[in-house]
Image (cartoon, grey):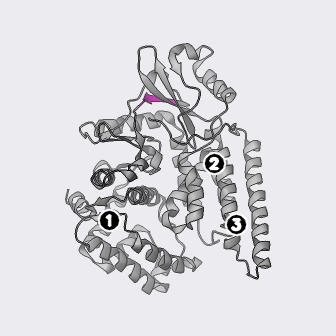
Amino acid sequence: MSDSEKPGRHRAVPSGRVSRLTGFGRLATGIAGGMMAEGARRLASGQMPKLEDMILTPGNAMRLADRLSHLRGAAMKLGQMISMDAGDLLPPELSAILAGLRDRANFMPPRQLQQVLKAEWGDGWRSRFAEFRAQPIAAASIGQVHKAVTHDGRTLAIKVQYPGIRDSIDADVDNVATLLRMSNMIPEQLDLFPFLEAAKAQLHEEADYEREAAQMQLYRLRLEQDNGFVVPEFEPEFSSKSILAMSFEPGVPIESLETEDQDTRNEVGERIIRLVTRELFEFGKMQTDPNFANYRYQPETGRIVLLDFGATRDIAPDVQQAYRQLLKAAISGERDGVIEASLAAGFMNEATVRKHAVSVHDMTDIILREFEREGPFDFGDRAFVEVLRDEGMRVAADREAWHLPPAETIFVQRKISGTALLCARLKSKVPVRDILIEALDD
């Protein structure tokens, strides 16, 4: 674990059911007020306001980001998912606001932190360390991280879970879903239940620090022969159900490489993409949270530090096979094969293909042309993304075409999409086609 560049501010974590419900009530009230103000503004300027325009305002996005940062836990995690999964689909100003949820959260005030550590380690816990920094070096949705030094000289990163987070997961997810329904942004015919249940299950897994420790050790073992990566070492002596201790691994934010030379950015992008293909087709296990803060870079060694293994999931054989079929069709340039594989995998439904065949064909052709380009894929060239976004928004206007893929696929796709966003941030040029051919031949 390494340092964070963007600390938040002291705000106590609402740990009780009533206090968290009150937080959601304030959010709903604030958004409603923002909608009324935006509607009045549009009417005054002679515009007929649309509901979605009144909801998706920078002001409401700021309210959402601030309240979710305060609540932390599943509420904030779902906000991170929205910002990451939406990728290029959100308006830039809204995307920028919500992106703050990816790498910055409020942190516990000292008194609340002291209560948590005393409950886990006992009254004399400070005597176990030569140094313990009360100011966190990172704060996220489920816990915050502190740097400490043991009496024998080991430098540790200690992740402390926010109080009440495990018990609030189910209610938080349900409350966020209710807000989405109330906003009329989700059509009634879209069945969110399977996704919400899967999200609850994953969030419970992420809050299980004993499980995360096991996943971290497994990745450390699998990558021990790969000099391109560093995985922290688990420290059981200081770990518990609510505390995860590990070796502190120095590094700089992965995004800071955007100012480095092209060769470095290309090499880092290629290494990360190769890891994703190994997870998908070799490991059968994937860390599905692509938050940029989960990667660090060591300029001295050129290695990438991998962090946060709470979202690690097993990949079912049928999901692996679905991706094999889809990628093989794409590499072969078979438009019909890509569409058939997308339907079989659950990426889209029959109504979309039936009612929007021209758009589906056009979007598929755009993707296939990118696959067929000679040389490395230039993630910095985003011209085709705007075309895909415009075509996709036309399809999305038809709510009958709205569709949720199987939950297992959603989490895998989240990692793939997030990795592409990171490579775009770095403007990496990567031989994606060659990497995929190699992975599919194994």
Among the two numbered marks 2 and 1 on one chain, the one whose residue lies closer to the N terminus: 2
The residue under the point 50% across, 35% down is 209
Q: Looking at the image, can residue 196 be seen? A: no
Which portion, as a residue range, is magenta? Answer: 244-248
181 lies left or right of 193: right
Q: Quadrant of residue 334?
A: bottom left
Residue 306 location (% of width, % of height): 38, 41
428 or 350, which lies in front?
428
Among the two numbered marks 3 and 2 on one chain, the one whose residue lies closer to the N terminus: 2
The residue wearing badge 2 is 170
The residue under the point 52% across, 71% down is 403
429 lies left or right of 241: left
Q: Main secondary structure of the magenta part?
A: strand
Q: For numbered disc 3, what is the local secondary structure?
A: loop
52 or 153, which lies in front?
153
The residue wearing badge 3 is 183
The residue wearing badge 1 is 378
Q: CA distance from mark 3 to mark 2?
A: 20 Å
Q: Is residue 217 above or below residue 433?
A: above
Select label 2 or label 1 by which is in front. Answer: 1
CB atoms of marks 3 and 1 within 8 Å? no
